[in-house]
Each structure stands twice: as structure tokens, then as C-alpha cells.
């Protein structure tokens, strides 16, 4: 028996238990409920997608402790590409197995880096879930306003928590980026150039690649993704903006939460929310560092005149984090293929147990 709760864009949830019928939260704008009758257990994700809704991930509840909150649910983010379905979770396991194999071969450094990558993949996935959770709270806080109308900007106590959750994701995502860069350096660059300085960040790799471009697929993918205008460059620019310059919500135009609706069958409208992202984070950083941002007193100091007006063209924070998570999973998969040690599933035997250890 598995209870599944899908996290969807905009803070929406779909609950699927042992029966074919699923329930959606919240109800439609008309207060009617949305019920999906599943063709099979495995058709849940495709049937939800057929409604035009984006699935962020899924909480799996398999024990009473998970249902009651004594243990956390088994969370997995859904792969946008479709296969494998749980790319990031698979990569968590893959890197854990690489760490185990490196440990058995007494390769301490590779074991350490691989363990950190496995940990950071799980950390980033959980940060994504935290963002999705506060999205639901933000949506619930707005549902009290009747009628629920789209494209209305608002600000309450949950709005800043949404952006705070996104900032935490950005920081952890870039830690993962650097761990992957460190592993790549140790297994690809060091064997060919033992005297090369130690590299622990993507920026370190990019400096080396100015002189000696990569020739292998993983290196080429990393380098291409980090070029200006590409996703890994943008991810780093958002991280640098929030760490070194200003919070996302007021780094440029002041950002409010925005109501939105998704069209469902029979003309019904499903309430949701959007937390817009500022565009061009690298340019925002430049404007603030040089002082250009503050030269326009109307924008720099008149808060209520500085609200972002056109939110329809901006990234949604939750959807952006979801896309980045899957792209990081794909990069992790590429880098895992250059590992000199093959992944191996740990097998614990009685000989491995020291002292009084109980497994349950």
C-alpha cells in the first residue's frame, strides 16, 4: 500500500491512495472538486500531465510513521525529460554506490567527494520540496480572498518565506555544482597533469579550460552549460546575486506573489500562485555593484513605484528550481561516467557489524 501526494506547479496537490480515484487541492474557483479516475497505478503522472499541469515531484508514504509525521515522506523530484522518471533520486544512489566502491578500494579522496555529491543531491532535492511546501502555504493563505482572481499581486508573511526557500536551493545547488567540478578535476585532469593546482569549484575548471579546453563529453557538457546565457551560468548568477548583493525579492524590481489559474476540463479554473524571478541576475549584480541601480531615485527608493508590472514573462521560482534540479541530475549522471571506480551496491554482512548494532 502506497499513498502518493503529487506536488504540482503553483502550490497545487493531488492525493492518490489505494483507489483509482484521486483528489486535488484546492478545489476549482467555482468550489467544485477535481477528481481523476486512474487507468492504472503507473498512469498517475501521465494523466496529470495530460491536464496541462506540471508535476514537480512526489511524496511516497509507505508506513504509518510517515503518514503521522513521525518520519518524513520519501520525496522524489520528477524528471522533466520523462526517463528515467526519478533521475535525481537515481543519481543520489549512483553516487552513494561510487563512494562505497571507492571506500572498498581505499581511495579516500574519491570516496569523500562522491559521498558529498550524494549528500548534496539529496539536499537539493529536499530544498526543492521545501520550496514547494511553502508555495502550498502561500496559496492557502490567498484562497481566503473571494473571489479568487488571476493576475493579482499580493504580499504576506509567506511571500518572503518562498523567496527564502528559493535562495536556500540556489546556494545548495551551486555547492553541488562545485562538488561535481572537484570530482571531475580529480579523475580527469589530475591523472594527466599531477602538478596541476587543486580545483574545487566550477570557476577553477573554467580558468583552466581557457588554456586547455576539455575533450571528453562530461567536460564539454559542463563547459557549454557554464557559458554566458546558458543554464549553469544563470544559476551561478542568481546564487551570486543573493549571496553577495541583495535578496531576490528586491534585487531589482520589487517582487510580489501573483495569483494565477490553470484551465481544467469543462472550463473549470484551478487556483494557483506564482513567485516571479527577476530577469538577468548578472546585469542586476553589475548595476548594484557599480551603483547604477541607485542613480535613479524613483526606482531605487520609491518602493511602491518599483513593483514588477509584467510578471507573465518572468520565470516562476518553483518551476525554475525544478528545471535546474533536473539539469543538475543530468550533469551528475554525465560526470559519474568518468569515474574510475564502478558503482557498487553496499552489502552488509555479519562480519561488517562491530558492537551492538540493531537493524530494523
Image (cartoon, rainbow, N blue to C red):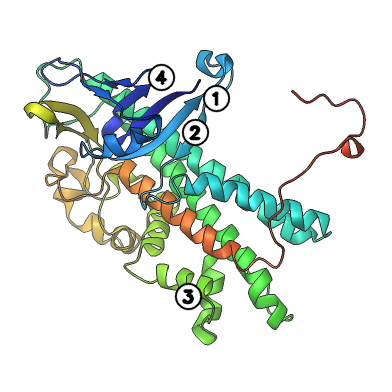
Of callouts 3 and 4, which one flags the residue occurring earlier in the amino acid sequence?
Answer: 4
In the image, residue 4 sits, relative to residue 301, either above or below, namely above
Mark 2 — residue? 75
Q: Is residue 161 visible?
A: no
Q: Which residue is mark 3?
A: 220
For the residue labelled by badge 2, is the local secondary structure a helix, a strand or a loop? strand
Residues under numbered marks 3 and 1 in contact, where contact means CB atoms less than 8 Å apart? no
Q: Between residues 184 and 54, which one lies in front from this camera angle?
A: 54
* Residue bearing mark 1: 72
Quote the CA–CA distance across marks 2 and 1. 8 Å
Name the quadrant containing residue 5.
Answer: top left
Q: Residue 153: x percent and y percent?
A: 16, 33
Q: Earlier in the sequence, mark 3 or mark 1?
A: 1
Q: Which circle marks residue 17 in the picture?
A: 4
Front tag of 3 and 4: 4
Do callouts 4 and 1 mark residues in contact (Cβ within 8 Å)?
no
Q: Earlier in the sequence, mark 3 or mark 2?
A: 2
Q: Position of residue 287 (x, y in %)?
A: 28, 61
**Quadrant the C terminus occupies:** top right
Give residue 214's position: percent from left, percent from top. Answer: 53, 80
Label 3 CA crowd tier, 10 Å (few <14, some 14–19, many 20+): some
**66, above or below 58, in the image:** above
Q: At numbered mark 1, what does the secondary structure look like: helix, strand or loop?
A: loop
Q: Is residue 235 above or below residue 33?
A: below
Q: CA distance from mark 4 to mark 1?
A: 18 Å
Whether residue 74 is visible, yes or no, is yes
Q: Residue at x 36, y 30 (%)?
A: 40
- Distance from Cα at disc 3 to Cα at disc 1: 38 Å
Amino acid at each position: 500500500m502506497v499513498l502518493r501526494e503529487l506536488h504540482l506547479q503553483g502550490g497545487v496537490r493531488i492525493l492518490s491512495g489505494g483507489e483509482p480515484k484521486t483528489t486535488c487541492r484546492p478545489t476549482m474557483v467555482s468550489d467544485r472538486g477535481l477528481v481523476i479516475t486512474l487507468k492504472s497505478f503507473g498512469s498517475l503522472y501521465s494523466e496529470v500531465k495530460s491536464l496541462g499541469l506540471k508535476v514537480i515531484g512526489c511524496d511516497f508514504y509507505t508506513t504509518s510513521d510517515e503518514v503521522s509525521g513521525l518520519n518524513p515522506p520519501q520525496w522524489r523530484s520528477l524528471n522533466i525529460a520523462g526517463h528515467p522518471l526519478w533521475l535525481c533520486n537515481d543519481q543520489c544512489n549512483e553516487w552513494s554506490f561510487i563512494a562505497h566502491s571507492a571506500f572498498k578500494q581505499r581511495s579516500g579522496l574519491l570516496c569523500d567527494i562522491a559521498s558529498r555529491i550524494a549528500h548534496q543531491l539529496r539536499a537539493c532535492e529536499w530544498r526543492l520540496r521545501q520550496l514547494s511546501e511553502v508555495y502550498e502555504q502561500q496559496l492557502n493563505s490567498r484562497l481566503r480572498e473571494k473571489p479568487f482572481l488571476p493576475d493579482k499581486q499580493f504580499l504576506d508573511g509567506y511571500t518572503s518565506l518562498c523567496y527564502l526557500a528559493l535562495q536556500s536551493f540556489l546556494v545548495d545547488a551551486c555547492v553541488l555544482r562545485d562538488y561535481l567540478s572537484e570530482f571531475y578535476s580529480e579523475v580527469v585532469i589530475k591523472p594527466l597533469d599531477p602538478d596541476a593546482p587543486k580545483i574545487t569549484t566550477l570557476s577553477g575548471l573554467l580558468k583552466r579550460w581557457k588554456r586547455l579546453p576539455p575533450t571528453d563529453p562530461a567536460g564539454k557538457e559542463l563547459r557549454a552549460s557554464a557559458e554566458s546565457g546558458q543554464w549553469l551560468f544563470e544559476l551561478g548568477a542568481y546564487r551570486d546575486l543573493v549571496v553577495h548583493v541583495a535578496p531576490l525579492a528586491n534585487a531589482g524590481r520589487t517582487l510580489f506573489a501573483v495569483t494565477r489559474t490553470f484551465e481544467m476540463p469543462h472550463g473549470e479554473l484551478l487556483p494557483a500562485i506564482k513567485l516571479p524571478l527577476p530577469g538577468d541576475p548578472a546585469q542586476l549584480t553589475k548595476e548594484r555593484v557599480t551603483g547604477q541601480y541607485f542613480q535613479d531615485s524613483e526606482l531605487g527608493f520609491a518602493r511602491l513605484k518599483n513593483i514588477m508590472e509584467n510578471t507573465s514573462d518572468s520565470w516562476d521560482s518553483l518551476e525554475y528550481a525544478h528545471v535546474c534540479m533536473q539539469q543538475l541530475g543530468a550533469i551528475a549522471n554525465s560526470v559519474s561516467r568518468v569515474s574510475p571506480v564502478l558503482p557498487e551496491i553496499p552489502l552488509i554482512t555479519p562480519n561488517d557489524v562491530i558492537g551492538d548494532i540493531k537493524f530494523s
